[in-house]
Image: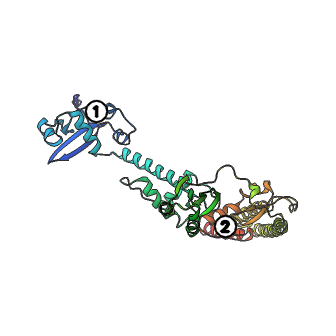
Amino acid sequence: MSRSVKQPIGQKRLTNVAIVRVRKHGLRFEIACFKNKVLSWRSHVEKDIDEVLQTHTVFSNVSKGVLAKSKDLIQVFGTDDEDKVCLEILEKGELQVADRERESQLSNQFRDIATIVMAKTVNPDTERPYTITMIERLMREVHFAIDPHRNSKQQALELIRELQKKYPITRARMKLRFVVPINQIESLTTALSSWNAQIEGKEETTTNTSLVCKIDPGHFRECDTLVRELQGTLEVVSMAVQGEGESNIDDFNDDDEYNAVHVSHVVEDENHLAQRLRDSASLSKSSGQGSGTTSDAAEVRGVRTNVIASTASGGSAPADSSVKQQVCKTCNREVGDVKQYREHFKSDWHKHNLKRKITGLPPLSAEECLADTDIDYGINDRDEYSR
């Protein structure tokens, strides 16, 4: 009959202990803390010391349970009060960070950096901020490495400079109010022009002149120095000017004459293109009856042709010139009225140009887009046939 092995019931395992250690004068002092609480204490989130320390005792070795001697505490810390010594070790000691705690710290800092970037940047075309999800995706695409020992704001500024090399993103401008004497306004205006500042308002009194302008944040220190020399005052109205409220698609293009001339031409060309590609798709189906793969690919190409062409033309006859036409800046073409404009955003043509815009490539017309997708399908057909 086999005997079961009995484990000692008085053994305590360090499964929920975070050790904070300090080395001074050749001596080692340790305290036992709860996991995920030390960082909260150092960031002033947790304020109850009893929720951080497992015991108000100073050890020389926590894992072996060896207590620190009182004479060593007096020699190193100047006191044998263990509560005061625990606080000092908690603030200045080295923390053995576990995997989950380190992952949590990096995740929080990653989110903080993305939030700072979102608050300080805008899209130069729309003057609106990017979403936090898009900023995080761009951070992963550029393989941005987070340094846990550096400030999040410094890393965010470095990230902005790195993103500007590959993506359409720029620092949001600051809005400043300058108040200078009247005889110094010319010097201020000259300096603002050299910094490409955008003046939004100007008010004059009997002695002073007030200017409100938008300026790049990189010139803020120069502005402060100049205002001090001119014996004026500088006020920050907004740290980052970003577009607010809902956008109205009616504001994209107000040139009705331009729309009336070009929309009918675009719709006519794309209807003709759609008909020509329908004929080629049907010809491909009839010639590929012996191969199921070729026939299926031709049918898919025909469906894609119909979708792109119908979306490009708004799914109807040429639009009436009396209706205001909308412009897609991604595809750089007019796409019809409001309903057609919304349907255009669901088309493969727009999605294809959106992918090209992200990679920095120019937009394609509907004909070029269809030719490009046909090449892709031809490559897929060849690969499928060679298997």
- Marks 2 and 1: CB-CB under 8 Å? no
Query: Mark 2 = which residue?
Result: 377
Residues packed near mark 1 inside 10 Å, few (<14), some (14 to 19) or many (20 plus): some
Residue positioned 29% across, 45% down in the render: 96
Residues packed near mark 2 inside 10 Å, few (<14), some (14 to 19) or many (20 plus): some
Mark on residue 54?
Answer: 1
**What is the x, y in percent for residue 80?**
16, 34
How is the structure coloured here? rainbow
Q: Amino acid at mark 2?
A: Tyr
Q: Nearer the viewer, residue 159 or 222?
A: 222
Q: Is residue 373 left or right of residue 265?
A: left
Residue positioned 35% across, 46% down in the render: 99
Q: Does dot 1 land on a helix, a strand or a loop? A: loop
Q: Is residue 143 visible?
A: no
Quarter-wise, where is residue 300 in the image? Answer: bottom right
User: Which image quarter holds the C terminus?
Assistant: bottom right
Q: Is residue 324 left or right of residue 43?
A: right
Q: Nearer the viewer, residue 227 or 114?
A: 227
Which is more foreground, mark 2 or mark 1? 1
**What is the x, y in percent for residue 16?**
31, 36
Q: Nearer the viewer, residue 156 or 214?
A: 214
